[in-house]
Image (tube, rainbow, N blue to C red):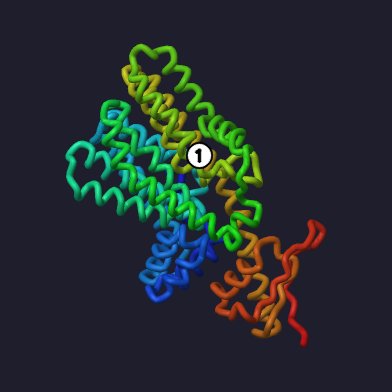
Amino acid sequence: MPYWRALSLPRISDTYLQIWLGKKYFAIATWPDLAADALYRCRATSIWLTGLTEYLFGSSQLVFNLQSMLLHALNVGLIIALGRFAPFSYRLTIPAALLWGFNERHHEAVMWYASLPEQLVFSFVLLSLLCWLSWWNSGKVVTYASAILCFLLALLSKESAVIFCGLVFLPLFHNPSGWRRAALAALPFFSLSALYFALNLAARDNHLHWNDGTFRLGWHFIPVIFNSTFRLLSLWGAAALLYLFFIRHQIDRRLLALSLLWIPLALAPYSFVAYQPRVPSRHVYIASLGVALILAMAFDRMVVRKRLTVALLAAYVSFNTGYIWFNKHDQFLTRANVTEDLVSNVRHYFARHGRRPIQVTCFPLAAQVASLAIQEHTGFPADLVSVQPAAAPSCGPTEVIPILD
């Protein structure tokens, strides 16, 4: 319900690039080129999924929006599946999954199709965890191998997949004596993560996010984690923690500790963000599960007070739905209108002057976004479009003018 209005959103900026990458790297013959790209090889699964979707269903934005919604619903199901294993239970994971699914805090990962890597890394990390917990209980080689395979797919989804190296010790919350078994079995995951980071670091000079101010190594990650954690908890998480503190003798404190540790662990790979003091909303997609577990623990103890519980749930759903419908939805429309207005201007220009080479002046986003948007909606070749980015705030409105030889 909170996200259904997102189905009607037009294409937003980097989504054009995401779809272009899907078309470019969908064919197996292009995979060596993808492997040579330091940035996008770490987002390969989203690129392949986008390419497959475009190949099967075309470039309708409604299809891409629906795919994002269904993937979010799939991730809700994966959270529920954790209830099969200790230290979880279905009594905890079902409300946690639903509360997480309704949460607005990670809205960007669901509403902006270019954030598809966030959803996929969540999917594969949880699949790895489910396989790992199954192996822990059964000792079957096939489930251990499946955990490694899912972890590899997680690494091909987003750099934050390395958090799984912390999650492998999750069973120790209820079985501390198994630490030797966990440490030995975790060696392949740590080795793959070390190799993954080494390859990333070796390609640092050619990696966009190492050079465009997005991330930088430094001690600033500490205040970023604190700011992001407090913002992620919000009023709901803070109230749940306060309630759990008052009934601390009635709850499993190890489970509460696990939920609290989940948040900074999941935020850690993003906490080196350099352009703002907290991580963007799309980057809390995994971390917000820790808050959902805290809310579910409080819910489990409050459910006996039926009227109060129903009222709080209604308030929670109403708040998250209203915030997305009446605040964030318009913000996303504003972001989409940058390219929507450009395409409209280009169509009017072609209607008046014919399809001739054009220059776009004072475009506020990346030049490639403008070229791809025009090509996608009008079929006009991108190499016949010259884009002049906005050089200063006083640049003025975006205009479409002819290229004069």
Q: Position of residue 192 (x, y in %)?
A: 39, 51
All told, the count of numbered labels is 1
Q: Left or right of 125: which side holds 354?
A: right
Residue 295 lies in what quarter of the image? top left
Indicate whether 250 appears above or below 171: above
Residue 10 in the image: x percent, y percent? 53, 60
What residue occupies the far right of the structure in this picture? 394
Q: Residue at the location (33% across, 14% down)?
A: 250
Would you call the spot at circle 1 few (<14 residues within 10 Å), some (14-19), or many (20 or more)? Answer: many
Observer able to see residue 306 = no
State whether residue 197 appears in this view. Answer: yes
Quadrant showing the N terminus:
top left
Quadrant containing the C terminus is: bottom right
Q: Tell me the SS state at disc 1.
A: helix
- The amino acid type found where label 1 is placed reads Leu
Residue 65: which quarter of the image? bottom left
- The picture places residue 361, in percent across and down from the top left corner, at 74, 70
Q: Reply above or below: 9 against 279.
A: below
Relative height, residue 290 to residue 204 (above, below): above
Q: What's the residue at 61%, 33% (across, down)?
A: 223
Q: Is residue 332 above or below residue 228?
A: below
- What residue sits right under mark 1 in the picture? 267
- Between 279 and 55, which is closer to the camera in this rendering? 279
